[in-house]
Image (spheres, rainbow, N blue to C red):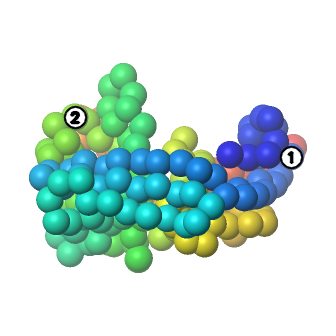
Amino acid sequence: MMTEADPDKVVRAGWVRFDFGIPEVAQVWCFADDATAFLRTKGGVTQRQLRGKRNARDLTFNGAALTLVGLLVQARWVSLFARVSALPDLEVAESVHDALEERIGSPLFLTLRTDAFFYQAAGPLWDVFSDPLPRGSATAYLERLHIECPPRNSGHRCEVRRSWLPKYLARP
């Protein structure tokens, strides 16, 4: 979705620019007994409930409201990327992670952010079903704190992190 051919070269050069235009994409989320389809066209975002009564992208665990943005199925775990209105404390983040990992039935790497910029975590560049889509520099997003929760079987727990990109870009 970036206009440049090689995003890693762009990041190494010290900048990332958004220029989405209007992508035409579709996505279906299924969670528990709910399934919701999303479609972005030039006319905007439409949502259709396929099953159940609740938007399958919006979940609440232990008081933390999440909007699912993307997922990546890998050989040893599933990476799930979710937007939150405010970062929860680490105890709540761990309870959310553990509940999701149990429901999904697979080791889970969960990333929580207050925005939908998951590039540094190998996730979606942006939530294309959010309005409005961003334009311009991504520098401010690279500086924001986020929470990463690796799979329980990794021996590590949730941590508040800052993007690795600013340090990476500062290297000589």
Local crowd at mark 1 within 10 Å, few (<14), some, or many (≥20)?
few
Q: Secondary structure at mark 1?
A: loop
Q: Earlier in the sequence, mark 2 or mark 1?
A: 1
Residue 121 coordinates in the image, percent (x, y): 53, 46
Question: Camera-side residue: 17 or 77?
Answer: 17
Q: Is residue 46 above or below residue 156?
A: below
Q: Which residue is rendered at x = 63% and y = 52% of the image?
A: 23
The quarter holding residue 65 reads bottom left
Q: Secondary structure at mark 2?
A: loop
Residue 164 coordinates in the image, percent (x, y): 63, 50
Left or right of 65? Residue 8 is: right
Left or right of 55? Residue 8 is: right
Q: Which residue is rendered at x = 19% and y = 42% of the image?
A: 104
Residue 70 coordinates in the image, percent (x, y): 43, 48
Disc 2 marks a residue whose amino acid type is: Ser
- Mark 2 sits on what residue? 106
Q: Which residue is rendered at x = 35% and y = 48% of the image?
A: 28
Local crowd at mark 2 within 10 Å, few (<14), some, or many (≥20)?
some
Q: Is residue 52 above or below residue 31?
A: below
Left or right of 74? Residue 5 is: right
> How far, Cα to Cα, is label 2 from label 1?
37 Å
| Residue 92 in view of the camera | no
Residue 56 coordinates in the image, percent (x, y): 26, 58
The quarter holding residue 82 reads bottom left
- Mark 1 sits on what residue? 13
Disc 1 marks a residue whose amino acid type is: Ala
Question: Camera-side residue: 21 or 66?
Answer: 21
Q: Which residue is rendered at x = 53% and y = 57% of the image?
A: 40
